[in-house]
Image (spheres, rainbow, N blue to C red):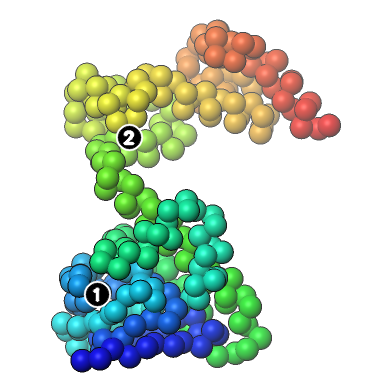
């Protein structure tokens, strides 16, 4: 069957569908969001059996059709012109446009349920208001920001699929984002991984290029520097906040890293910010 050419008005940014799609070719770029796994996409010669929470990036070079496997299942499209997409892509590596333009290997990836829901909630508002002309400029900005966010997710997905990092390491790094955890012993934090300390240390260095102890120390002192320059906690309180029972040990380690005492660091950086 001959495919049709899909043209969407410039002020239509997103549409939700509860049906599949006959073979068509895009005049613009389309970001197709599939919250459920009830679809099969045909893109040129590729067959994509979408899992739940899949996003597919499609352009004028892609012939596309969608088979709906369960009646009533919904998907949502975001539309953007080539020139506008190129402007957004200026934020990213120049190779990204070439990647999404590949005819036989369309870019598609999965996101979390929460991420998909958040994007769709924003797009629902856009769709509700896009028929009102005065809202068009701000809806365009919202849509473009969501597309930039989606492209960032695509880069993350492709990078980490090619440069695999064990989930245990990711979980450990997430733990260090919680300030209270910097007060704990490193061995206690590693225990959450289920691995022995020695094994996890080797694993961490293999995938990050840094020793586990050095990274943990850096995390503690990044926090210390933040507290020194953004608040009025005493040095004793800051030392305790980053896991030191001895303020003298904290000061000695701080001086070893920054070549000055915490007192001098605070004085230098708070006075500089007032100039």
244 relative position to 1: left or right: right
Q: Nearer the viewer, residue 36 or 90?
A: 90
Residue carrying label 2: 172
Taking the spot 29% from the left edge, 73% from the top edge, the residue there is 34
| Image quadrant where one finds the N terminus | bottom left
Taking the spot 47% from the left edge, 66% from the top edge, the residue there is 147
Location of residue 74 in the rendering, given as x and y in whole percent from the top left corner = 29, 82
Count of marks, rendered view: 2
Residue carrying label 1: 44
- Placement of 257 over or under 47, stated as above or below: above
Location of residue 41 in the rendering, given as x and y in whole percent from the top left corner = 22, 76
| Residue 57 in view in this figure | yes
Question: In the rendered structure, are the residues bearing label 1 and label 2 in contact, judged by CB atoms less than 8 Å apart?
Answer: no
Q: Quadrant of residue 36?
A: bottom left
Location of residue 172 in the rendering, given as x and y in whole percent from the top left corner = 32, 34
Q: Which mark is residue 133?
A: none
Location of residue 126 in the rendering, given as x and y in whole percent from the top left corner = 51, 79
Outermost residue to the left: 69
Q: Nearer the viewer, residue 259 or 221?
A: 259
Q: Quadrant of residue 101?
A: bottom left
Q: Nearer the viewer, residue 81 or 267?
A: 81
Element type where label 1 sits in the image = loop
Element type where label 2 sits in the image = helix
- Placement of 32 over or under 24, stated as above or below: above
């Amino acid at each position: 069957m001959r495919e049709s050419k899909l043209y969407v008005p410039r002020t239509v940014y997103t549409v939700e569908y509860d049906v599949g799609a006959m073979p068509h070719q895009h005049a613009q770029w389309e970001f197709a969001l599939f919250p459920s796994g009830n679809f099969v996409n045909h893109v040129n010669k590729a067959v994509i059996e979408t899992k739940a929470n899949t996003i597919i990036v499609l352009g004028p070079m892609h012939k596309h059709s969608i088979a709906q496997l369960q009646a009533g299942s919904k998907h949502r499209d975001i539309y953007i012109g080539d020139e506008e997409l190129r402007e957004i892509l200026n934020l990213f590596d120049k190779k990204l446009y070439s990647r999404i333009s590949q005819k036989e290997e369309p870019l598609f990836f999965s996101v979390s349920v929460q991420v998909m829901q958040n994007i769709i909630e924003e797009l629902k508002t856009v769709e509700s208001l896009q028929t009102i002309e005065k809202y068009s400029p701000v809806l365009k900005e919202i849509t473009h920001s969501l597309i930039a966010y989606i492209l960032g997710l695509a880069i993350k997905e492709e990078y980490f699929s090619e440069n695999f990092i064990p989930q245990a390491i990711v979980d450990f790094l997430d733990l260090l984002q919680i300030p209270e955890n910097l007060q704990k012993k490193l061995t206690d934090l590693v225990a959450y991984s289920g691995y022995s300390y020695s094994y996890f240390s080797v694993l961490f260095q293999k995938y990050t290029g840094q020793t586990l102890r050095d990274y943990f120390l850096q995390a503690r002192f990044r926090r210390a520097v933040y507290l020194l320059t953004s608040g009025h906690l005493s040095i004793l309180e800051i030392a305790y906040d980053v896991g030191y029972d001895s303020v003298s040990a904290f000061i000695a380690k701080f001086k070893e890293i920054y070549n000055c005492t915490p007192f001098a660091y605070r004085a230098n950086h708070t006075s500089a910010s007032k100039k």
